[in-house]
Image (tube, rainbow, N blue to C red):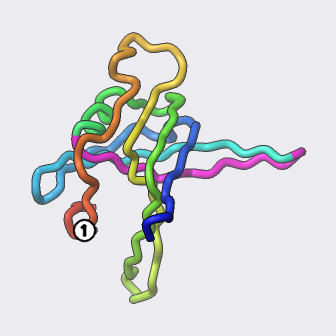
């Protein structure tokens, strides 16, 4: 597995304001969606990317990201498997962000390029949602 690469990069707009919670160990965890447009000839669509941030990055994202802000997000893709109330297997794919950069103008430029400083929680039980 040493030569594998799990790295995703997106430019899009925050689809909603971030939601922040804390893990059982007290680590800050912030989620938001990123709307990423796609156009091929006359076909246009939008992909909705679920983004999760941890630690200091989570704190800064929760403080500065607002719905509609244009962002560059870089991280790794993770798919979680879970069961619904009927016992059917369901899957949720998300990006565990390690970098978020604001694009466009802002009054707080020092907060716009930040990297995650904490290890992402590998255990789904660690995250309270």
Seen in the picture, residue 89 relative to 109 is either above or below; the reply is below
Name the main secondary structure of what is drawn in magenta.
strand
Seen in the picture, residue 4 relative to 86 is either above or below; the reply is above
Q: Give the extent of the magenta segment.
A: 41-55
Residue at figure coordinates x 54%, y 45% from the top left: 9
Would residue 63 be found to the left or right of residue 91 on screen?
A: left
Q: Depth check: give the residue in front, 91 or 79.
A: 79
Tell me the quarter of the picture where residue 25 sits: bottom left
Q: Depth check: give the residue in front, 126 or 14.
A: 126
Q: Depth check: give the residue in front, 27 or 63.
A: 27
Residue 21's spot in the image, x, y percent? 22, 49
* SS assignment at label 1: loop
Residue 71's spot in the image, x, y percent? 51, 32
Residue 84's spot in the image, x, y percent? 40, 80
Seen in the picture, residue 19 relative to 114 is either above or below; the reply is below
Would residue 51 be found to the left or right of residue 29 on screen?
A: right
Residue at figure coordinates x 11%, y 51% from the top left: 26
Please identify the residue farthest to the top as the structure is shown: 107
Q: How many marks?
A: 1
Quarter of the image with the C terminus is: bottom left
Circle 1 residue: 123
């Amino acid at each position: 597995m040493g030569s594998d690469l799990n790295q995703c990069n997106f430019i899009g707009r925050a689809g909603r304001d971030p939601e922040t919670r804390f893990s059982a160990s007290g680590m800050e965890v912030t989620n938001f969606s990123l709307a990423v447009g796609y156009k091929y000839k006359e076909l246009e669509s939008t992909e909705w990317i679920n983004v999760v941030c941890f630690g200091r990055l989570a704190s800064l994202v929760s403080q500065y990201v607002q719905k509609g802000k244009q962002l560059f997000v870089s991280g790794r893709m993770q798919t979680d498997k879970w069961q619904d109330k009927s016992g059917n297997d369901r899957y949720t794919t998300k990006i565990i962000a390690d970098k978020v950069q604001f694009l466009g103008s802002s009054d707080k430029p020092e907060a716009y390029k930040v990297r995650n400083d904490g290890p992402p929680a590998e255990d789904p039980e660690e995250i309270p949602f």
